[in-house]
Structures are given as C-alpha cells and as structure tokens.
Amino acid sequence: DAGVTQSPTHLIKTRGQHVTLRCSPISGHKSVSWYQQVLGQGPQFIFQYYEKEERGRGNFPDRFSARQFPNYSSELNVNALLLGDSALYLCASSLRQAGGIDEQFFGPGTRLTVL
Amino acid sequence: GDSVTQMEGPVTLSEEAFLTINCTYTATGYPSLFWYVQYPGEGLQLLLKATKADDKGSNKGFEATYRKETTSFHLEKGSVQVSDSAVYFCALSDRTNFGNEKLTFGTGTRLTIIP
C-alpha cells in the first residue's frame, strides 16, 4: 500500500508569492495534519482536518490556510511568502479511530525555499 | 502550553555503545508520549509510544518509559548500530477538539554511530 504522498518534492518561490502544497493520505485515512519543520527544529503543528472540516489550528498567521477534499486529500496554501516560511512542510494522516491513540503516518515532505 | 525539551545534540557514539537521549515534557493534562525517528531525506517514522504513566514503549531494541513523577520519557538502547544514525524527536499528543491529533515536538537530537 502507498504511504502518505506529497507534492511537489521541492519548490523555490520568491517573497510575496503564493504556494500550494498537496497531500494524499493513506487509503482509508480520513484525518490529515500539516506541520512546518524549520531546519534544525522539530515540526510545528499548523492544521488538522477531519472529514473536510478544520479540527485544529496551530499558532500560524492567516496567510496559512488549508482545505480537505471529498477524497480526503488536502492542500496547504501560503500567501505573501516570507523568507521565514522556508521549511520542510510535512503532511500526516491517521485513521481517527474512536477512542485510543491514532498513529500519525508522515509523508516525505515538501521542501519550500523562499528567496 | 505544552512543551517538550530534549537533549541537545549532536550525539556521537561508537557501535555497540549504550544510548540514552533525555526527554522531559510539560503538559496540562495526561498526554501520550512518542519517539519519532527521521532518517536523511525521509519523513518521520513512529519509533515507539506510551499512553499512560509507567507504560513502556519498545521497538527495534529501543525503549522508553512514561515517568509521570519526573515528567520524562527518556529513550534508551543497549547496543546501537550504524543504521541507528538519524534524528530522534520526542513528542507528546495534545487532545484537540476532536481527538489526540496535534503533536508537540522537541527540537530533535541528531545521533551518529561510528563503526
């Protein structure tokens, strides 16, 4: 079975531009979360979506937005890019079973460089 | 808010040495605790987890025990191998409005094993 897939793998943008990152969860997984990992740091939570609704939001500005589609894939959008947005953007999916602890499965990430 | 503090790296050990990577946490409730590993050029992989006090998570020779009294979740391995070289992240789960999905990560510890 395919794992979590993300596209593109790498992306170079300039300040002020807009970017869209895409994520396809593992088949059957209905929850998708996005994380930002700045070089040398741990991932920071950006959003969680479940059943196409936002279920959690981290401490990120409104320039960051996301959505989940009927097939449970997801897009992360970042407007008015800043140099500080350069990072590895990770997508994770989980089953969201009732009760218990869901393991989150991470994709390989999209490396965004803002010049 | 929730936070995770882990041992500063990098850590360099000889093959077959004993490994300890310290991790302590701050949380308002009763979080679940995780260790993730990130190999070069790859996404995060769950290494082990523990969901309540005194639980011991284990996988691939690695172990960590959930110590509520010391708010710690130290990672240990009795005999490391070159293939264990990676970045290790301690993390806790924070119950969002709809389940345990948000992960709060430490800054990561880079481990290098020398043959």
Image: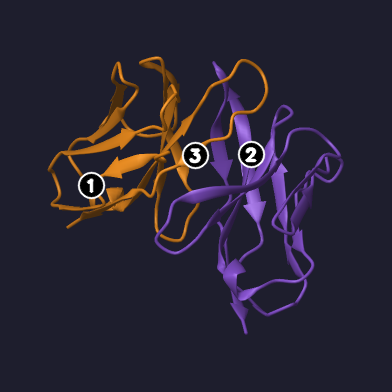
Chain colours: A orange, B purple
C-alpha gap between disc 3 and disc 2: 15 Å
What percent of the width, then of the height, locates residue B112?
58, 74
Q: Residue at x 65, y 56 (%)?
A: B6
Q: What residue does disc 3 label?
A: A105
Q: What residue does disc 1 label?
A: A8
Tell me which numbered mark, 3 or 1, is placed earlier along the sequence. Answer: 1
C-alpha gap between disc 3 and disc 1: 18 Å
Q: Please tell me whether mark 2 sits on a helix, a strand or a loop.
A: strand
Which kind of residue does numbered mark 1 sit on?
A: Pro
Split into 4 quadrants, where in the image is the N terminus of chain A? top left
Split into 4 quadrants, where in the image is the C terminus of chain A? bottom left
Q: Residue B68: which quarter of the image?
A: top right
Number of residues whose C-alpha sits closer than 10 Å to that of mark 3, classed few (under 14), some (14–19) or many (20 or more):
many
- Asked if one can make out residue B1 in the rendered structure from this viewpoint, the answer is no
Side (left or right) of B115 relative to A55: right
What percent of the width, then of the height, locates residue B95?
61, 24
- Which is nearer the eye, B5 or A21? A21
- Which is nearer the eye, A20 or B82? B82
Number of residues whose C-alpha sits closer than 10 Å to that of mark 2, classed few (under 14), some (14–19) or many (20 or more):
many
Q: Please tell me whether mark 1 sits on a helix, a strand or a loop.
A: loop
Q: Please tell me whether mark 3 sits on a helix, a strand or a loop.
A: strand
Which kind of residue does numbered mark 3 sit on?
A: Phe
Q: What residue does disc 2 label?
A: B92
Q: Residue at x 77, y 48 (%)?
A: B72
